[in-house]
Amino acid sequence: DTVLTQSPALAVSPGERVSISCRASEGVNSYMHWYQQKPGQQPKLLIYKASNLASGVPARFSGSGSGTDFTLTIDPVEADDTATYFCQQSWNDPRTFGGGTKLELK
Amino acid sequence: EVQLVESGGGLVQPGRSLKLSCAASGFTFSDYYMAWVRQAPTKGLEWVASISYDGGSTYYRDSVKGRFTISRDNAKSSLYLQMDSLRSEDTATYYCTTLQLRSRGYFDFWGPGTMVTVSS
């Protein structure tokens, strides 16, 4: 299976820019997607196919990357962005998720 | 507004069975592939199974093949997951999701989940 590696946690101050990385163990073309999961809630789609913003998602969120290295950027970060962020690939079977990056606000 | 509501979770002993249901509304159910994704306590997300528009094709992760069965009833806008021979490692919150086949499959809408605990 394709393993997606994310940093476990990040802490940033409101108003700053944060980049959350996801590295795949093998190429996934541009078929990487990002989700936000707030405590006690279900995941929510943020970005699909590397850089496409899902409906209703603020333009503060953006995605980039291809091949094995991908980035989710939030600029500027707001207090409401406290959550865990997961990447997911759909190029290789089975579809797999990263372990998640917990974003904390200082 | 798309709504997915799971039910049927609970505490079950190892080796026993449980059937999860998902009631869908706010969209044309038969136009979507559907899937179950699970999340063990304090762990990451794991795709479990998916099903085609008419139920004619089903897909499973290796660890549940032969034990879990995904099905759907388009007339009732409902998705199901029959789980047999349950193991402790199946303990998780199970989410019902739509599966968007553009971009080879991402999960665009999620229900709030139902918790399954497998323990004696």
Image (tube, coloured by chain):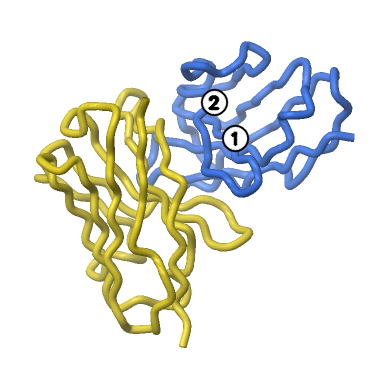
Chain colours: A blue, B yellow
Residue B70: quadrant of the picture: bottom left
Return the residue found at the far bottom: B120
Task: Give the residue number, with chain letter if any, for mark 2.
Answer: A46
- Residue B101: percent from the left, percent from the top? 29, 29
Q: Amino acid at mark 1?
A: Gln
**Does residue B105 appear to the left or right of B117 in the view shown?**
left
What's the mark number on residue A36?
Answer: 1
The chain letter for the residue carrying disc 1 is: A
User: Does residue B86 appear left or right of residue B65 in this picture?
Assistant: right
B100 w.r.t. A38: above or below: above
Quick one: label 2 or label 1, which is nearer the N terminus? 1
Chain that bears disc 2: A
Mark 1 element type: strand
Closest to the observer, B83 or B3: B3
| CB contact under 8 Å: marks 2 and 1 | yes
Instruction: Report x, y in % for residue B82.
Output: 24, 64
C-alpha span from label 2 to label 1: 7 Å
Residue B48 or residue B79, whichever sits in front: B79
At x 46% / y 77%, what residue is drawn? B88
Q: Residue at x 44, y 51 (%)?
A: B113
Residue B14: image location, x then y, percent: 39, 83
- For label 2, the crowd category at 10 Å Cα-Cα, with few meaning under 14, some 14 to 19 and many 20 or more, is many
Query: Which residue is located at x 74 percent, y 26 percent?
Result: A19
